[in-house]
Image (spheres, coloured by chain):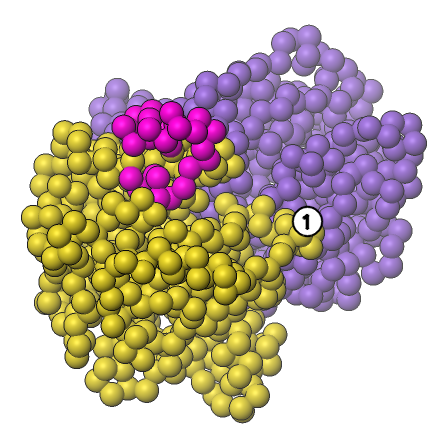
Chain colours: A yellow, B purple
Amino acid sequence: MKKIFLSENDLPKTWYNIAADLTSAPLPPLHPGTLQPLGPDDLAPLFPMALIEQEMSMEREIAIPDPVIEGLRMYRPSPLIRATGLEAALKTPAKIYFKYEGVSPAGSHKPNTAIAQAYYNKQEGVKRIATETGAGQWGSSMALAGQIFGLEVKVYMVKVSYNQKPYRRSMMESWGAKIVSSPSKDTQFGQKILAEDPDNTGSLGIAISEAVEDAATKDNTKYALGSVLNHVLLHQTIIGLEAKKQMEIAGDKPDIVIGCVGGGSNFAGLAFPYLRDKINGAEIDFRAIEPSACPTLTRGNFTYDFGDMAQMTPLVSMHTLGHTFMPPGIHAGGLRYHGMAPMLSHVVKEGLVDAYAFPQIEVFDSAALFARTEGIIPAPESAHAIKGAVDAAVEAREAGQEKTILFNLSGHGHFDMSAYDAYFAGNLTDYRPTDDDLAAGFASTESLPNAD
Amino acid sequence: MKKIFLSENDLPKTWYNIAADLTSAPLPPLHPGTLQPLGPDDLAPLFPMALIEQEMSMEREIAIPDPVIEGLRMYRPSPLIRATGLEAALKTPAKIYFKYEGVSPAGSHKPNTAIAQAYYNKQEGVKRIATETGAGQWGSSMALAGQIFGLEVKVYMVKVSYNQKPYRRSMMESWGAKIVSSPSKDTQFGQKILAEDPDNTGSLGIAISEAVEDAATKDNTKYALGSVLNHVLLHQTIIGLEAKKQMEIAGDKPDIVIGCVGGGSNFAGLAFPYLRDKINGAEIDFRAIEPSACPTLTRGNFTYDFGDMAQMTPLVSMHTLGHTFMPPGIHAGGLRYHGMAPMLSHVVKEGLVDAYAFPQIEVFDSAALFARTEGIIPAPESAHAIKGAVDAAVEAREAGQEKTILFNLSGHGHFDMSAYDAYFAGNLTDYRPTDDDLAAGFASTESLPNAD
């Protein structure tokens, strides 16, 4: 392991907006009732105007406000690390670098956008943020960000996680957030679900619906989302912008850029600043790695679909397994999403980014190898990127090529040790949806507008 | 929060040995059979000669070997952070700085010595390390260090922790260590205990005895200890040596230096380099903070005592509650030790360092305040140092003095969230041993040599 640090003064002052450099534009989001392209006013009940403007901006560089930079300084710039131990173990001529986002207090890249979102809400007089969380990564990041800017944060936490992950809950409480098990009695939608089925264990779709209702109906309250949207991907580009400065210090340029994908934000955060170079002629191989259990990019359709199971969100054009697709309970909970960020889907469709899917046992094999050679125990989500890097390094060895590989280690696994427990005990199973499983999911999008 | 980083090149090249600067020497350890001062040969079955030499060295500066520096670079230099958020919340004119050791892969300061110990063992041809662990901090640090230098590591983990802390166990497994629940069938001592009481839940005393037996009887195997010994404290001085460089960059000097104490190594690591300045005339107020539940320095006797309950170790002169004293199950498991590092006990006895004890609910109040204002969730052990710093900052406010406070944040609390759960749920209780409890512990040292 060899680290390349930046000083605080090297923290980027602007985010990079890839919309300015794309030669073709993604299709616009549609209002689910009218099927007309969404305008800023449609989003105003949920988001502050500054974020809506970023969502639709065509400016290449967007200034990061000073108080956001101040907040990010809590853990940024994050280190770029050369994985010399992993290289040696793989006997590869490739150089492997990774950007380590686990240094944030919440343990992942999520605060990069949570801090920005909290700031813009605070600026526009918002007092409360309502949001949802599954495994807890996003909820804890929003709790932290709310604490920084003095916003109240209410987190609707999927009931099964609320009961199984008390530690993430305590973390959010440590940062002053209010957490409720979803479905809850705090919203009409939650009450309706509970009346029909008091034992409902909840889902991300239900939790989103509750948070959106809360934001739309309560005073001084807005909603916040941790992935998928353009402004979220924008805020994450600080990862790639820092990485470029650090790779320059290292005297290297990546031939292959790798990240795991669930909603797409950590991959986009590292990749988009480099994708600009590819659009301008550089030869870079981009690899988005997803779980075989939820193969959105590798086996999904590209079409308009709802972002949530409850069909409350706008229709967006993306790769999707269908909004009714229910991924099995793999340990990389953050990658269990039926859709994908529209901006990332677009560049995959354009052939700029390739997608790969791996089953979880192979992913944990790579995670264990990484822990032994580099000392860091990765989050199961981030381990997908490691698996991608290991395969690329083995390819380089077999081809006798001195490739330079860069991947994003989006978080540590300190709150996922039960997954390692299961892995070391030989209790993990792999899962791939059957064609019938996929067909059932796709059926839910049949009546929606075609995006091709 | 404002961070002061050092570059990798600023990593100290030598450790600081306080023995060279003390005006009076601590009493020597005694052989438990002969009651004569121990010689190097008495320790040779357990430790490599290089560590035995460090244990007895009077040299002021001891060079850190290059491979140890390389290993420490995995996470060092650690950041020095100005706790501006905590200062604001306390409305204090004091400046509060802390050194953050939670950045190590194991999450605490323990790898600082584990890496050095693994190196010296490797150098002398040792193939295996046997050690014990209670809560798991030390065992995981030794597992990591063994991985770095290619040593097999066998950890005897106290059975109650083995069952209650599967995550720490998985962490050690991730780093390739072999873990066994203690009492185990792997040693004669363990077999004897199990024969008498198959349901014995284990203790640190039993686990130490098993690890020592393993090291003394198995080929190419030595023993390793994570605190108390002089060479352990020596290796931890890298914390204070870095802090001095960073405080210089910040343009400040500490008036008050604070750390939590269990065995004493993290406190000594930060404090000893500054204690040298006090010996040379500087005015610095040193505060060692311990739990009221295990008040070794504040209510213990200074006498010769065994380091372990099983009476296997040499007799050392220290503050002690008696080797039979059984501290209650507070959440700061790393501070539940009946004795104290002899070198730290000595400087407390000499009046160079003051000791304070706090009950755990007040300690968690400070931990929660710190998490909200600085973003980092501290280990319950480290939270004792925060409580000390909070009290010092409030004193400064009340006296209207611009004091500079420096404390050691020895680790994060990611593996202790159940303690925060209990705290937020109002389920923590305070505990102070009664005079009768203490008298019973002291009785176990009555027949041992007096150290006064």
Q: Quadrant of residue A118?
A: top left
* Residue A351 percent across, percent down from the top left: 31, 80
**Residue drawn at (50%, 18%) of the image:** B427
* Residue A210 percent across, percent down from the top left: 29, 35
* Subunit bearing disc 1: B
Task: Tell whether B442 sits left or right of A222.
Answer: right
Does the image show residue B149?
Answer: yes
* Residue A203 percent across, percent down from the top left: 41, 41
**Residue drawn at (46%, 18%) of the image:** B426
Asked if residue A201 lies in the magenta stretch, the reply is yes
Q: Which residue is mark 1?
A: B55
Looking at the rendered structure, the kind of residue marked 1 is: Glu
* Residue B8 percent across, percent down from the top left: 42, 65
Q: How many marks?
A: 1
Q: Quadrant of residue A231?
A: bottom left
The relative height of residue A285 versus residue B205 in the rendered view (above or below) is below
Find numbered disc 1 in the image and state the secondary structure of the residue it sits on: helix
Does the image show residue B286?
Answer: no
User: Which range of residues does the magenta coloring cover?
Assistant: A183-209
Q: Quadrant of residue A101?
A: bottom left
Task: Tell whether B394 sits left or right of B73.
Answer: left
